[in-house]
């Protein structure tokens, strides 16, 4: 007798049902297409917006998911994986207070959590939007998983944000090269770096394309170099199209000509050892920039950094935006703003006084608009 | 979507009834019914608990694969028949503390953040099962149960495993107790193929994240007298801490083996 499986009614009725079920399976970790639409946020009760004169202030800030300087296992020498609501909210309030103090017109954020387990399932973007003067935001995930079965991370959704008082359009997630130095299963659950692109139309001025990037921090192969090439390629596209743009974010890279390029000792946690015979790895992942010092040169050569390279090379400490050590001062520059147009002279600022709000200092500069 | 799904399930059951033949359903698949394992017989799955028929009135059960991490044991007791309904009760105890402490760890396998330390928890489950033969090849069952935990200390609410299937089954470790209500239909499709459609709700006695529903469909293939392969799906709905109510679909697979 032939099995029931080969009888027509079974095939007609059951197989489509099974296909339907398995097609609607949600994967544990999200994989991304090359280009995807961003998630848009809008404030219900809009804040009043004053039209700019001739410039807008643009700021980029890696906010370290609102936990300030608290020790997190992934990027500091801490043991903590998850934080309670009462630990996250003060951190977010501090970030919000600083944003309201600087009042950028366009704000790029990196490492913003949306309903992640480690930050008590707070929608940090909604929180920031509600407590600032911004009316619109675009969000793309760079690390999204229903459940990460490692270190108690659980559900994760961390991403990039662009905030604006004016409507944002054409917001997209542009996927960057996958890390080549991770095993398949680790990479499956790991973050996938990306660019958030959007456009803002400010009444009376030419539309401004915006690019916000968070490049890989810990890749030890040439993944970061690929990210900078992809970032520059996006800028090139806009430049060739005759558009003016603002591009920036956390590039996790030092400018060319930096005096210090190896931070293994600065970033070393208790019990770790680097640079000694037999140490494997010899360098702490993400802390040794020595082989990478020229990787940002093509971007510097093609576009205008808010802090020109010559200024940086003569005033390095004033441009530092990061340190892993809460008890020390800033020790390296990782965060940038670029344009193919102009920054207002003398307007660029590294907000080094915001030391306790994140492990990155925000960078701001006034971007010169072009009238319609 | 839900209507389409219900209709498909209805068709699924109807078609299989047409092809049904009488006989070995209970012999092969009495798990989840009011029927007990025959005296001296045993069966176990990789995920399905080990079951052993002590006598005609009592069955012993324990989940063998997780036993070292979660000591557990239970009894199913036959309470007799009324009209065409067979009634049994199920009682089980488990201590999830070692499991929770093991998965609260650094690195891969750390399902819970390592900063949490779990004190003694004893979970107690009691339920009633009722089964009725609809035909020689089809059996309907219903269950109602109450699950609660005795805790040395209330665990931190942020130390839950926020995954479907895990979360509702562990909810009472953290806060409240759980009322379980369910129904299932089992049938045979000849002598080697069997199916089950199961519906289960979990109502947790607490103000939020307190309602869960699961629908599972399983096909089982009896490879021989003592080995069966089961596979299917679980469609889970739940109120988890992070989002508004959510549906998720999971595949299932198990290998069941035991006495001939």
Image (cartoon, grey):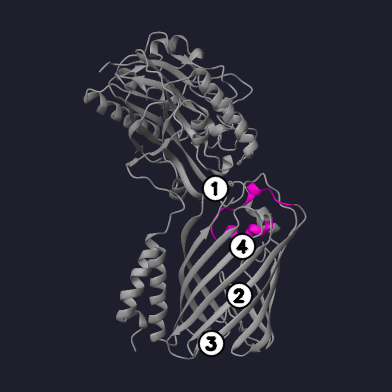
The picture places residue B111, in percent across and down from the top left corner, at 59, 51
Q: Earlier in the sequence, mark 3 or mark 4?
A: 3
Q: Are marks 2 and 1 in contact (CB under 8 Å)?
A: no
Element assignment for label 1: loop
Element assignment for label 4: strand
The chain holding disc 3 is: B
Q: What residue would you read off at disc 2?
A: B143
Residues at marks 3 and 2, CA–CA distance in whole angstroms: 15 Å
Q: What residue would you read off at disc 1?
A: B242
Indicate the quadrant where residue A119 lies: top right
Q: Residue at x 56, y 79 (%)?
A: B141
Q: Which mark is residue B33?
A: none
Q: Earlier in the sequence, mark 3 or mark 2?
A: 3
Crowd rating for badge 2 (residues with CA inside 10 Å; few <14, some 14–19, many 20+): many
The chain holding disc 1 is: B
Q: Nearer the viewer, residue B218 or A258?
A: B218
Q: What residue would you read off at disc 4?
A: B203
Is B160 one of the magenta-colored residues? yes
**Callouts 4 and 1 on one subunit:** yes
The picture places residue B67, in percent across and down from the top left corner, at 66, 66
Residues at marks 4 and 1, CA–CA distance in whole angstroms: 18 Å
User: Which image quarter holds the C terminus of chain A?
Assistant: top left
The chain holding disc 4 is: B
Residues at marks 2 and 4, CA–CA distance in whole angstroms: 14 Å
**Callouts 3 and 1 on one subunit:** yes
Residues at marks 3 and 1, CA–CA distance in whole angstroms: 42 Å
Q: Which mark is residue B133?
A: 3
Judged left or right of residue A35, residue B198 is right
| Range shown magenta | B154-173
């Amino acid at each position: 007798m032939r099995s029931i499986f080969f009888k027509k009614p079974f095939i007609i009725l059951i197989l489509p049902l099974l296909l339907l079920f398995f097609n609607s399976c949600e994967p544990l970790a999200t994989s991304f297409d090359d280009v995807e639409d961003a998630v848009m946020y809008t404030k219900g009760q809009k804040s009043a917006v004053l039209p700019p004169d001739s410039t807008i202030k643009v700021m980029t800030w890696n906010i370290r998911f609102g936990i300030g300087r608290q020790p997190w296992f992934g990027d500091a020498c801490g043991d903590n994986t998850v934080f309670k609501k009462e630990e996250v909210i003060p951190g977010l309030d501090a970030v919000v207070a600083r944003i309201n103090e600087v009042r950028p017109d366009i704000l790029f954020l990196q490492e913003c959590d949306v309903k992640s387990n480690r930050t008590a399932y707070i929608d940090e973007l909604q929180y920031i939007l509600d407590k600032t003067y911004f009316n619109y935001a675009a969000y793309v995930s760079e690390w999204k998983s229903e459940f990460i079965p490692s270190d108690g991370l659980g559900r994760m959704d961390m991403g990039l944000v662009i905030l604006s008082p004016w409507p944002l359009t054409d917001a997209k997630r542009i996927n960057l090269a996958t890390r080549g130095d991770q095993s398949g299963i680790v990479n499956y659950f790991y973050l996938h770096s990306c660019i958030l692109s959007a456009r803002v139309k400010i009444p009376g001025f030419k539309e401004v394309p915006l690019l916000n990037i968070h490049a890989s921090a810990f890749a030890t192969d040439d993944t970061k170099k690929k990210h900078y090439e992809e970032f520059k390629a996006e800028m090139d596209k806009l430049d060739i199209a005759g558009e003016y743009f603002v591009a920036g974010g956390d590039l996790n890279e030092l400018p060319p000509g930096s005096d210090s390029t190896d931070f293994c000792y600065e970033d070393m946690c208790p019990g770790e050892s680097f640079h000694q015979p037999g140490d494997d790895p010899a360098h702490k992942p993400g802390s040794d920039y020595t082989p990478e010092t020229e990787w940002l040169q093509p971007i510097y050569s093609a576009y205008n950094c808010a802090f020109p390279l010559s200024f940086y090379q003569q005033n390095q400490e004033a441009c530092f935006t990061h340190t892993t050590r809460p008890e020390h001062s800033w020790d390296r520059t990782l965060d940038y703003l670029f344009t193919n147009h102009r920054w207002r002279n003398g307007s660029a600022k590294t907000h080094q006084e915001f030391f306790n709000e994140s492990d990155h200092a925000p960078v701001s500069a006034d971007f010169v608009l072009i009238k319609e | 979507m839900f209507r389409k799904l219900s209709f498909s399930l209805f068709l699924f059951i109807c078609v299989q009834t047409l092809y049904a033949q009488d006989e070995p359903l209970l012999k092969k698949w009495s798990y989840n019914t009011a029927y007990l394992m025959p005296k001296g017989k045993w069966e176990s799955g990789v995920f399905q608990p080990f079951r052993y028929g002590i006598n005609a009135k009592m069955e012993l059960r324990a989940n063998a694969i997780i036993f070292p991490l979660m000591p557990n044991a239970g009894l199913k007791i036959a309470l007799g028949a009324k009209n065409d309904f067979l009634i049994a009760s199920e009682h089980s105890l488990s201590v999830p503390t070692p499991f929770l402490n093991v998965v609260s760890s650094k690195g891969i396998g750390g399902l819970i953040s390592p900063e949490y330390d779990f004190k003694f928890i004893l979970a107690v489950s009691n339920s009633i099962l009722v089964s009725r033969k609809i035909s020689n090849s089809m059996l309907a069952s219903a269950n109602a149960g109450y699950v609660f935990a005795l805790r040395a200390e209330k665990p931190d609410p942020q130390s839950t495993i926020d995954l479907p299937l895990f979360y509702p089954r562990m909810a009472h470790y953290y806060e409240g107790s759980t009322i379980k209500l369910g129904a299932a239909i089992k049938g045979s499709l000849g002598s080697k193929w069997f199916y089950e459609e199961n519906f289960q709700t979990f109502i947790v006695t607490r103000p939020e994240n307190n309602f869960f529903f699961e629908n599972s469909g399983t096909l089982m293939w009896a490879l021989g007298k003592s080995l069966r392969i089961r596979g299917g799906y679980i469609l889970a709905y739940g109120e988890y801490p992070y989002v508004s109510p959510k549906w998720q679909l999971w595949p299932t697979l198990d290998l069941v083996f035991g006495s001939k």
